Image (cartoon, rainbow, N blue to C red):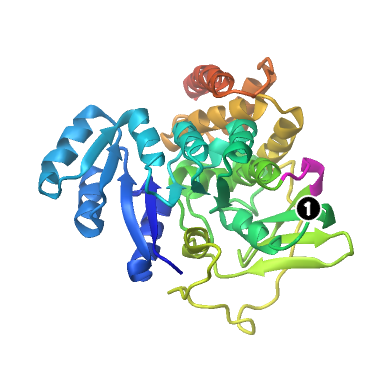
C-alpha cells in the first residue's frame, strides 16, 4: 500500500479517535494532513502536537484564535465554522476525507469533498439520510468514491465486492437490539438517559447510542443503504443479532448468503475505508469461532421500537421526509439527553413532525436544508411542550 493523505472531520469524537488510532498503527502509510473539532480545543491541540496536520478547522472564530495561539509554532492553517469544514473537505492534496462529524453540519463538507472527486469515508449518517439523492448524484458526476464506515455498511460493501447488484436478492442489516431490547413497551417509554446509554456491545457517541436504543439508528442505516448500494428499500431487511459479531448479510438470487463477521470494534471498518482496496494487519484481535458460541437472529419488534418503522416509512415517502426525520431526531435526542423528555417522547415528537411536513423534492442542498430548519423548529416546540407536561 502506498501512503495516503487523509483529513478527519470530527477528530475528537469516537470515530475520529479510533481513526487516529488506526493511523498510528499503520505507521508511515497514513499522513494526517487535516483535522477538525467543534469545541474540544484542548484535545485537538494534543492531536496537532502528535500528528502535525497542515490544516485544522474549528467551530467558531474564538476557537480558531485559541487553537492558533496554542499551536502557532507549527505554522498550521486554521479555519472555522461551516466554511472551515467545507475548506478542509476540499483539501487539494487529500486522498481520503473521513467525515465523522455528527449531525446535518456534515452535509455541506461531504458535498464539497464529493464535488472535488475525493474518496469520502462516510461515518456521518445525516449526509446520506437527508441528502442522499444530491450526494450520490454528484458522486456519479465527479467520479468520487463513497466508502462506508458504519460497521454494517462496511460489511455490505465488502460482501458485494465483485458482485453485480442485479444478483442481489436482499441486504440484511444486523442490530444488537440496543440497551432496551428486553424491556416492555411501558418501561421503555419511561426510560431516562443514563439507562439508555448503557449499550451492551459497542462504545459509541451519546447520540448514536440513544438512536441505537430506539432502533432509529438502524432505520437511518436502512436509508443509507438505499443510497449507498442503489437497492430499493423493499430489498433491505433488519434482524437482531445480539452479540454484534455478524455485521451484515447479503442474500443473492441463487439462494446463497454471504455474511461478514468480526469483533465489534470500529477500528476495523475505519481501517478498511482508509486502506481500501488493500487489507493491512490490525491491532484488533481476530474472532475465536469456537469460543463465541451460537448465533441467533430475531425479527425486530416494531411495536416496542416504532422509530424503525418510521424510518422505513420515511424512505418510502422519499423527498425531504428523511431530512425532516433526521433533523427532528437530533433535536429530540438532545432534549432526551438533557433529561427534558422521556424516551417515549422521542418517537412522539418525530411522528408528529413527519406527519406535519409538506413533502418536497430533495434534489438540491437548499431544499434539504430548508426542510432541516423547519423540522428543527417544529421538534423544538414539541420538545418544549412535552417538557412542560413533565
Residue 268, horizontal then vertical, whole percent: 51, 65
Q: Residue furthest bottom?
A: 290
Q: Residue at x 66, y 37 (%)?
A: 307
Q: Nearer the viewer, residue 55 or 157?
A: 55
Q: Residue at x 14, y 46 (%)?
A: 71
Residue labelled with disc 1: 165
In the shown orientation, is residue 337 left or right of residue 31? right
Mark 1 secondary-structure assignment:
helix
Q: Residue at x 55, y 32 (%)?
A: 329
Residue 279, horizontal then vertical, whole percent: 53, 71
Circle 1 packing at 10 Å, graded few (<14), some (14-19), many (20+), is few
Q: Nearer the viewer, residue 269 or 77?
A: 77
Question: In the rendered image, is residue 187 in sight?
Answer: no
Q: Is residue 232 magenta?
A: yes
- The stretch in magenta equals 230-235
Above or below, 178 against 136 in this view is: below
**Total number of numbered discs in the rendering:** 1
Q: Is residue 236 magenta?
A: no
Residue 265, horizontal then vertical, whole percent: 50, 65
In the shown orientation, is residue 23 left or right of residue 241? left
Question: In the rendered image, is residue 147 in sight?
Answer: yes
Residue 36, horizontal then vertical, whole percent: 32, 43
In the shown orientation, is residue 77 left or right of residue 248? left
Q: Residue at x 64, y 34 (%)?
A: 137
Amino acid at each position: 500500500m502506498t501512503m495516503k493523505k487523509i483529513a478527519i472531520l470530527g477528530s475528537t469524537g469516537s470515530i475520529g479517535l479510533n481513526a487516529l488510532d488506526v493511523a498510528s498503527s499503520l505507521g508511515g502509510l497514513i499522513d494526517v494532513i487535516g483535522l477538525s473539532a467543534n469545541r474540544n480545543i484542548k484535545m485537538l491541540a494534543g492531536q496537532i502536537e502528535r500528528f502535525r496536520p497542515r490544516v485544522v478547522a474549528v467551530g467558531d472564530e474564538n476557537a480558531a484564535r485559541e487553537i492558533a495561539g496554542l499551536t502557532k509554532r507549527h505554522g498550521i492553517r486554521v479555519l472555522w465554522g461551516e466554511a472551515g469544514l467545507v475548506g478542509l473537505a476540499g483539501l487539494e492534496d487529500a486522498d481520503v476525507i473521513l467525515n465523522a462529524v455528527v449531525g446535518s453540519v456534515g452535509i455541506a463538507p461531504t458535498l464539497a469533498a464529493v464535488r472535488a472527486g475525493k474518496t469520502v469515508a462516510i461515518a456521518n449518517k445525516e449526509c446520506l439520510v437527508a441528502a442522499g439523492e444530491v450526494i450520490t448524484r454528484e458522486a456519479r458526476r465527479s467520479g468520487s468514491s463513497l466508502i462506508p464506515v458504519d460497521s454494517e455498511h462496511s460489511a455490505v460493501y465488502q460482501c458485494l465486492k465483485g458482485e453485480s447488484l442485479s444478483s442481489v436478492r436482499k441486504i440484511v442489516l444486523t442490530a444488537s437490539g440496543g440497551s432496551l431490547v428486553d424491556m416492555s413497551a411501558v418501561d421503555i417509554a419511561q426510560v431516562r438517559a443514563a439507562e439508555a446509554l448503557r449499550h451492551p456491545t459497542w462504545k459509541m457517541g451519546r447520540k448514536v447510542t440513544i438512536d441505537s436504543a430506539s432502533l432509529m439508528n438502524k432505520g437511518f442505516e436502512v436509508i443509507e443503504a438505499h443510497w449507498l448500494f442503489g437497492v430499493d428499500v423493499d430489498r433491505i431487511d433488519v434482524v437482531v443479532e445480539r452479540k454484534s459479531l455478524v455485521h451484515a448479510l447479503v442474500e443473492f438470487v441463487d439462494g446463497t448468503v454471504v455474511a461478514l463477521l468480526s469483533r465489534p470494534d470500529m477500528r476495523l471498518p475505519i481501517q478498511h475505508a482508509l486502506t481500501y482496496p488493500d487489507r493491512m494487519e490490525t491491532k484488533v484481535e481476530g474472532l475465536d469461532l469456537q469460543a463465541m458460541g451460537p448465533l441467533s437472529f430475531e425479527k425486530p419488534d416494531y411495536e416496542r421500537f416504532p422509530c424503525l418503522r418510521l424510518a422505513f416509512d420515511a424512505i418510502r415517502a422519499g423527498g425531504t421526509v428523511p431530512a425532516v426525520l433526521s433533523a427532528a431526531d437530533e433535536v429530540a435526542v438532545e432534549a432526551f439527553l438533557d433529561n427534558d423528555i422521556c424516551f417515549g417522547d422521542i418517537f412522539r415528537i418525530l411522528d408528529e413532525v413527519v406527519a406535519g411536513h409538506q413533502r418536497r423534492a430533495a434534489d438540491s442542498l437548499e431544499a434539504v436544508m430548508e426542510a432541516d430548519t423547519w423540522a428543527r423548529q417544529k421538534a423544538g416546540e414539541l420538545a418544549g411542550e412535552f417538557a412542560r407536561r413533565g
